Image (tube, rainbow, N blue to C red):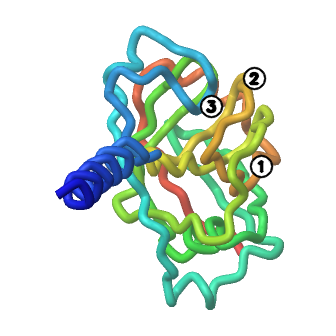
Amino acid sequence: MRKIIVLLFTLIMGISLSACGNKNDFSSNTPSLQSGKTDKNSKNVQKSTVPKKTSSTMESVSAQGARVKLTFDGKEVMVKMYDNPSSRDLLAQLPLTLNFKDYAGVEKIAYPSKPITTKDAASGADPKLGDLALYSPWGNLVIYYGDSDYADGLIILGHIESGIEQVGVMNKDFTVKIERMD
């Protein structure tokens, strides 16, 4: 009888602990994990989980020397892409038209319709002004136009070569066409 009770207790504890260990469960009231800062709109951020996947298309797309053009409101921003699986997966999905909005006064974010792979990605990154990144826990693209801190789950996809000043002045939500240039 004692063995049954111990076994039952162990089973219940195992189930309880595994339910508490889901690192991708973000409450809608969680402060920004992208920037380490909070803002009054942080409760409105959608949560999203990006599954790890391997796209057969992404393997055939090279990001080596690739450039991407972001077009919005009559403006153009040029991004030099880094060569990593996430960047290749984004390039394979281009062209894209996404709606960006401001987040925390330092970044513009948008949610692609298809998840971008996180295969072989580092556990996080310290973004710089002008970085284009994927915040994998939420599945959103990020353009940094201000200073931000290290963030777990951040994958840097590329860096803006020209036009960063045009991103920060966009005060409202805006639509961006993203297309490969080479």
Q: Label 2 near label 3: C-beta < 8 Å? A: no
Residue at position x 34%, y 53% from top? 14
Question: Going by the image, does 154 lie left or right of 72?
Answer: right
Q: Amino acid at mark 1?
A: His
Q: Position of residue 140 (x, y in %)?
A: 47, 47
> Which residue does the numbered mark 3 point to in the structure image?
167
Q: Nearer the viewer, mark 3 or mark 2?
A: 2
Between the C-alphas of marks 3 and 1, the distance is 13 Å
Residue at position x 69%, y 28% from top? 145
Residue at position x 40%, y 29% from top? 173
- Does 13 appear above or below 117? above
Closer to the camera, 121 or 101?
121
Q: Position of residue 87 (x, y in %)?
A: 65, 66
Under circle 3, the secondary element is: helix
Q: Nearer the viewer, mark 3 or mark 1?
A: 1
Q: Position of residue 27 (x, y in %)?
A: 34, 30
Q: Earlier in the sequence, mark 1 or mark 2?
A: 2
Q: Amino acid at mark 3?
A: Val
Between the C-alphas of marks 3 and 2, the distance is 14 Å
> Which residue does the numbered mark 1 point to in the structure image?
159
Q: Earlier in the sequence, mark 3 or mark 1?
A: 1
